[in-house]
């Protein structure tokens, strides 16, 4: 499904994403917040998207982004 991303804190740079693949294994969630209502047995299916370098912004490995999937 089509998707777009924004670098956290930079809503002025919209990045179009292209679907690449789905990792075939469901893995445990690694980043836990420590909140009392958080479930430790959470599993994550990784969906991989790719993109071209955006003009006017640097993107680094591990950088957080806000991603929106078009489910229409």
Image (tube, grey):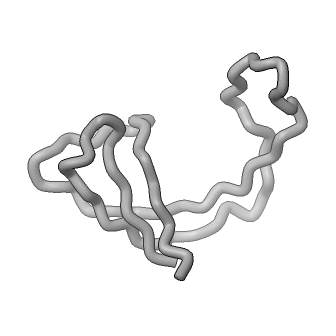
Corner quadrant of residue 58 = top left
Q: Is residue 69 left or right of residue 12?
A: right
Q: At x 43% / y 68%, what residue is drawn?
A: 3
Image location of residue 24, percent across then percent down: 74, 64
Image location of residue 67, percent across then percent down: 45, 54
Q: Is residue 20 left or right of residue 42?
A: left
Q: Is residue 62 above or below residue 44?
A: above
Give the residue at the far right of this rendering.
41
Q: Is residue 34 above or below residue 46?
A: above
Q: At x 37% / y 56%, what residue is drawn?
A: 5
Q: At x 26% / y 62%, what residue is drawn?
A: 52
Image location of residue 36, percent across then percent down: 83, 18
Corner quadrant of residue 10 = top left
Give the residue at the far left of this rendering.
56
Q: Is residue 60 left or right of residue 25?
A: left
| Number of marks drawn | 0
Q: At x 79% / y 54%, what residue is drawn?
A: 26
Q: In this view, does 9 lie above or below 6?
A: above
Image location of residue 17, percent across then percent down: 38, 66
Q: Nearer the viewer, residue 23 or 7?
A: 7
């Amino acid at each position: 499904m089509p998707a777009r991303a924004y670098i956290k804190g930079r809503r002025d740079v919209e990045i179009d994403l292209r679907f690449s693949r789905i990792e075939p294994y469901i893995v445990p969630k690694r980043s836990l917040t420590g909140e009392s209502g958080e479930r430790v047995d959470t599993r994550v299916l990784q969906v991989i998207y790719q993109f071209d370098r955006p003009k006017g912004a640097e993107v680094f490995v591990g950088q957080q982004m806000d991603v929106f999937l078009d489910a229409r």
